[in-house]
Amino acid sequence: LPVTMSIGFGLLLIPTATKNIRRMWAFPSVLLLSIAMVFSANLSIQQINGSFIYQYLWSWTINNDFSLEFGYLIDPLTSIMSILITTVGIMVLIYSDKYMYHDQGYLRFFAYMSFFNTSMLGLVTSSNLIQIYIFWELVGMCSYLLIGFWFTRPIAASACQKAFVTNRIGDFGLLLGILGFYWITGSLEFRDLLEITNNLIQNNGVNSLFATLCASLLFVGAVAKSAQFPLHVWLPDAMEGPTPISALIHAATMVAAGIFLVARLLPLSIVIPYIMNF
């Protein structure tokens, strides 16, 4: 305990030492993301060899008719997105080490960045719609914190609030779409949604207009996250955050979440006649 207290007082009394020592926290962030990138590359190799991985890790049975399964789904889409997220994330973290060196919020910045990258990886490996929604919200929360990182600046505070409100519109549509498809199919698993929806539509077991509405609501979530018209108004103001955040949000990861959602649900959209005709 005395040694710990001495170190603490030393850090308080020597600001330069504090700056140098706190930079050590950047190393674990880069290291862990590098390990994730290696795993992602390995998964891509397995995908080339034709391997398909699905596993649920935990099941919560609420009653005899309803249970939630949490796990991961690894397919070519997951592999591509994982490599994209980890590669861009590593480069942004390395750049951020120097960029944020003199900022008082250095540790807070790397905590937010690590949380953001973790949420994105959780999103792309989700095996069902409920996991998609949970990590979707976590990504939105991280973007709010990162855009408003310099919250003492009125412009930055306003920008993060605009991003939060605009994305809530899309998130509400996404939630309604998820609930709609659960009402139709009784399942949230990707492996079940396509098969059940296709059978119901072929046998006229569900109103095609209602299925189209649910699919459109899911698309609203992707529109907001990818900053597409008319829910694009938050993206220009996102530049009020630190430059590494702007690169992360604009260039690769966050706006790609909407593209990922559309790609993940594309097989489901194909079996809905009105969607493809539109």
Image (spheres, helix red, strand yellow):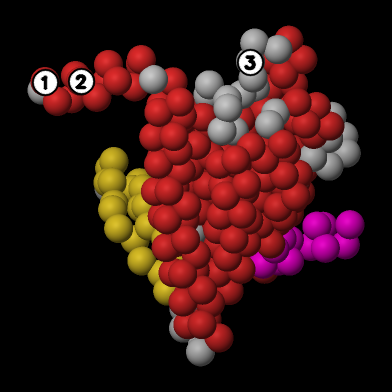
Q: Nearer the viewer, residue 2 or 146?
A: 2
Most extreme residue toward the bottom, as rendered?
49
275 drawn magenta: yes
Q: Are marks 1 and 2 in contact (CB under 8 Å)?
A: yes
Neighbours of disc 1 within 10 Å: few (<14), some (14-19), many (20+): few
Residue name at image x 59 percent, y 33 percent = 100
Neighbours of disc 2 within 10 Å: few (<14), some (14-19), many (20+): few
Please tell me whether residue 42 is drawn above or below residue 208 in the rendered image: below
Q: Which mark is residue 6?
A: 2
Residue that carries the numbered disc 1 in the rendered image: 2
Please tell me whether residue 78 is drawn above or below residue 119 in the rendered image: below
Residue that carries the numbered disc 3 in the rendered image: 151
**Kind of residue at badge 1:** Pro
Give the magenta-colored segment's residue range: 266-278
**Kind of residue at badge 3:** Phe
Q: Position of residue 173 (x, y in %)?
A: 68, 35
Q: Position of residue 54 (x, y in %)?
A: 41, 69
Nearest to the eye among marks 1 and 3: give it: 1
Q: CA distance from mark 1 to mark 3?
A: 36 Å
Q: Are marks 3 and 2 in contact (CB under 8 Å)?
A: no
Please state, as top left, top right, bottom left or bottom right, where the N terminus lies in the image: top left
